[in-house]
Amino acid sequence: MSEIKVGDLWVSSYSSNWVVRIKDFYKQDGTVEYLDDDNILESSHVTSFIEDFMFLEKPKPKHSHYHKDVSQYDTMDIYAICKVWNVESSGCTFAAVKKLLNAGERGAKDRITDLEQAIGSIEALIKLVKMDVE
């Protein structure tokens, strides 16, 4: 059996209609076995469940450098997104990304104001980069 990792997709050996993503394992008694890559192979529940499945390798998307696997997260905030994408820790960058992702949706400002402020943050970052001060 291939090594099992959290986030993997496995497909049934009998029917491709049954696909599972390894995450938390709910036992019959209603309790949850929280899994991570360190304890997943020690889990008899997971290994016995997955015996009739085979690993389904995820196809690489076109332009894969624009895609990141975030299946291990339930939710992500702006800081987690920036960390996954290896964005430098710059207040200018975080401010611009936050405003672009939620332009007009944060309640305090309208869409145009958020977009204009994102441009301002990007222009400030460009000046810092040109000065070689990030």
Image: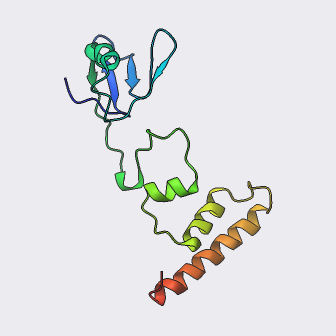
Location of the N terminus by quadrant is top left
Judge from the rendering whether residue 16 lies leftward or rightward of residue 127; answer left or right.
left
Judge from the rendering whether residue 107 lies leftward or rightward of residue 8; answer left or right.
right
124 is higher (above) or lower (below) than 89: below
Residue extending farthest bottom? 131
Relative image position of residue 17 (x, y in whole percent): 39, 16
At 54% across and 57% down in the image, what residue appears?
A: 79
At 67% across and 56% down in the image, what residue appears?
A: 102
At 44% across and 54% down in the image, what residue appears?
A: 84
Number of callouts: 0
Q: Nearer the viewer, residue 15 or 41?
A: 41
Q: Quadrant of residue 103?
A: bottom right
At 52% across and 82% down in the image, what residue appears?
A: 126
Relative image position of residue 33 (x, y in whole percent): 43, 23
Judge from the rendering whether residue 79 lies leftward or rightward of residue 25; answer left or right.
right
Colouring method of the image: rainbow
Q: Nearer the viewer, residue 85 or 36?
A: 36
61 is higher (above) or lower (below) than 20: below
Judge from the rendering whether residue 16 lies leftward or rightward of residue 30; answer left or right.
left
Relative image position of residue 46 (x, y in whole percent): 33, 19
Residue extending farthest left? 1
Q: Nearer the viewer, residue 73 or 11?
A: 73
Q: Nearer the viewer, residue 93 or 39?
A: 39
Relative image position of residue 38 (x, y in whole percent): 31, 35
Q: Quadrant of residue 70?
A: top left
